Amino acid sequence: MYILKNSIRNVTRNAGRNILIGMIVLVIAISSCIALSIKQSASQLQTTGLSKIEITGSISVDRQALMSQAQDSGTDMRALMQESESLTLAEMQNYATSVNVKDFYYTLSSSMSKGTGLEPVSTDAVTTAATTQTQPTAPTESEESNKAISPSGMGTQGDFTLTGYSGENAMTSFISGTNQVTSGQLFSFDTADMTCLISEELATFNGLSLGSTIQLTNPNATTEVTTLTVGGIYKTTTATADSGAMRFSTAADPANQIYTGYNTLNAISGQSLSVATLGTDTSGNQTTTALRTQESGIYTFSDMTAYENFKTDVTAMGLPSSYTVTSTDVTNYENSLLPLENLNTFATIFLVLVLLIGGSILVVLNILSMRERKYEIGVLTAIGMKKKHVVFQFIAEGFIVTLIAILLGTGIGAAVSVPTANALLSQQVASIQTQEESQQSNFGRGGSSSGGRPGEQATVNYVQSISSATDITVVMQLIGIGILLTLLSSCGAMVFILRYDPLNILSNRS
């Protein structure tokens, strides 16, 4: 108890020196509080952010694995890709039986060409098409020769993208509000009713209304004509072709997206397959004029744990290694945290530098302090106080000063950490966006792109701000830093105290 009382008394007795030490520790505490708050916020967002969004995933061919397999075995990668075609609906439904799957829905999509009286929305032909309504011309002989396609290929690209949905839960763009039906009603999900939804732009561009019929053709065989009835019209907030992004086909324009039921598109595809012409190209590959379609299955999961467990389940259920489970939601969320991760890295480096520099200064100050208080040490040891008790007294003095500075620094740091972190985060976001825009501009594309079809905009919604993360974890970390700084700065003092001879100190006092 005497040692503790003497330590408290010495703190006030040597006020000038202790105030200097306290100010240094205060700066370290504020800087550390800001850095630790940023790290804590980043950690919380990474662990809890995904729980606030619905996680969806899909199974697709793992091209990276195929490339590695081709390199290791010397096999032609094109042959491996032909063997690893997309999963059938039955196979996807089988994997959907996993207990970790919350819901499963599927879509069927195809690229189709314009028919009589229907023109795709295109900024390159708005003036002429809107006024003259040019009719589709008959395909030339060279065009017809390109219609036959390999079964593993994508087929000839059409003017429109026709998508068939299994149910309302599959229409995620309408659920999120990106698309909204403005007139009419949805098509049937249970039967092939041959009705569809078209965009307001496409309807206006072609003078269509509810009840109008549109004709679409198979781009691989233009004699195959499909007639659909416009049952509804929707508006979309998706960036269109005038956003400055390069589009390689009008089918990629949101205005040219036509929606229908899965059964309707499946019936169209089945009819095309029944009348398809088979052949062989110059390389010996089989060709067909059947309408090309792509089936996609989407799995939904309640949380990240279920998503990770699903990956294990499908492997146990026999999913080949050439397929992989991916989630756009997880990827987009991880991409949105990129500025925060950069800031987290900066905060870590800043924290280490602050501790190294601040700790070094405290060590030097404590060594100088021991030299000044050498006579006091000699007196204490001469009257019988053991050296380890003297060491403990000086450590206690340092801890008292450090604790007071840490508590003050925590309060100040908590108050300034949020605005400081958000200001730094805004700079990170601006820097990344500027870099992305510069890269896109180098390729002749406007805006930022982060995936999707070539030339399509897919802007990442980066985390723009963080809330206060100076919680009990940060406070305990700061107290731990205070104890560490006290012990490190006292190491030099301990060495001096243990080496001092009290009789020499007293006899050599000047």
Image (tube, grey):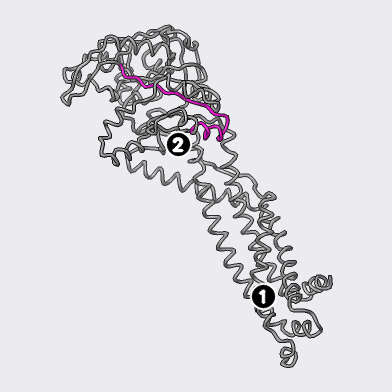
- Residue marked by disc 2: 459
| Circle 2 SS class | loop
For residue 257, above or below residue 388 = above
Query: At which x and y percent is residue 428?
Result: 50, 49
Query: At which x and y percent is residue 3?
Result: 80, 73
The residue nearer to you, when weighing 416 against 111, is: 111
| Circle 1 SS class | helix
Q: What stretch is highlighted in magenta?
A: 291-311
Query: At which x and y percent is residue 466?
Result: 60, 44
The residue nearer to you, when weighing 196 against 245, is: 196
For residue 318, above or below residue 405 = above
User: Which residue is pictured at 30% across the width and 41% down the height?
Assistant: 72
Query: At which x and y percent is residue 342?
Result: 50, 50
- Magenta span includes 308: yes
How packed mark 2 is, by other alpha carbons closer than 10 Å (few <14, some 14-19, many 20 or more), is some
Nearer to us of marks 2 and 1 is: 1
- Amino acid bearing label 1: Asn
User: Which residue is pictured at 76% across the width and 75% down the height?
Assistant: 389
For residue 69, above or below residue 428 = above
- Residue 23 shows in this picture: yes
**Quarter of the picture holding the N terminus:** bottom right
The residue nearer to you, when weighing 173 against 7, is: 7
> How far separated are the C-alphas under marks 2 and 1?
54 Å
In the rendered structure, the answer to whether residue 413 lies left or right of residue 56 reads right
Q: Residue 366 carries which label?
A: 1
- Amino acid bearing label 2: Thr
